């Protein structure tokens, strides 16, 4: 599903790239974002997928409600 690619696949790729850069350059400042992305991926796998789906569906419903009102006067 494209949702999983966007919210899980890209963060995994970013975490791997940040960790590889931190290891290769021996630069400590890239370890924190790499670990944060890894923690996000773990959250997503444990149950965050449903949370994100609920938030996105809620935003879509809210946008539908906002867009279905009467036209604003010019």
Image (cartoon, helix red, strand yellow):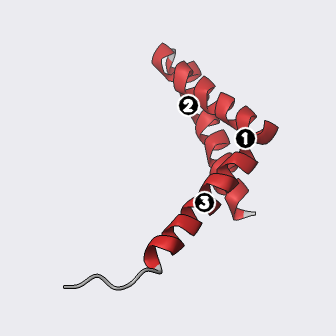
Residue located at (68% from left, 59% from top): 3
- Give the total number of marks visible in the rendering: 3
- Image height of 52 relative to 21, above or below: below
Measured as percent of width and height from the top left, residue 38 is found at: 67, 30
Of residues 71 and 4, the one drawn nearer to the viewer in this rendering: 71
- Gap in Å between the C-alphas at discs 3 and 2? 32 Å
Residue 44's disc is 1
- Image height of 7 relative to 45, above or below: below
> In which quarter of the view is residue 42 placed?
top right
- Image height of 26 relative to 14, above or below: above
Residue 58's disc is 3
Frontmost of labels 3 and 1 is: 3
Residue located at (55% from left, 31% from top): 18
Whether residue 27 is visible: no
Frontmost of labels 2 and 1 is: 1
Residue 17's disc is none
Whether residue 29 is visible: yes
> Which quarter of the image is occupied by the C terminus?
bottom left
- 70 left or right, relative to 47: left
Residue located at (61% from left, 32% from top): 37
Q: Label 3 neighbourhood size at 10 Å, few (<14), some (14-19), many (20+)?
A: few
> In which quarter of the view is residue 72 placed?
bottom left
Measured as percent of width and height from the top left, residue 67 is found at: 45, 77
Measured as percent of width and height from the top left, residue 30 is found at: 50, 23
Q: Which residue sits furthest left? A: 74
Q: Secondary structure at mark 3?
A: helix
Q: Earlier in the sequence, mark 3 or mark 1?
A: 1
Q: Are marks 3 and 1 in contact (CB under 8 Å)?
A: no
Residue located at (72% from left, 41% from top): 44
**Residue ID for mark 2:** 18
């Amino acid at each position: 599903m494209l949702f999983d690619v966007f919210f899980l696949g890209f963060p995994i790729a970013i975490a791997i790239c940040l960790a590889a850069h931190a290891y290769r350059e021996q630069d400590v400042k890239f370890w924190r974002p790499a670990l944060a992305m890894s923690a996000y991926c773990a959250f997503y796998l444990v149950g965050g997928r449903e949370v994100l789906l609920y938030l996105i569906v809620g935003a879509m419903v809210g946008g539908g409600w906002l867009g279905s009102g009467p036209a604003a006067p010019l």
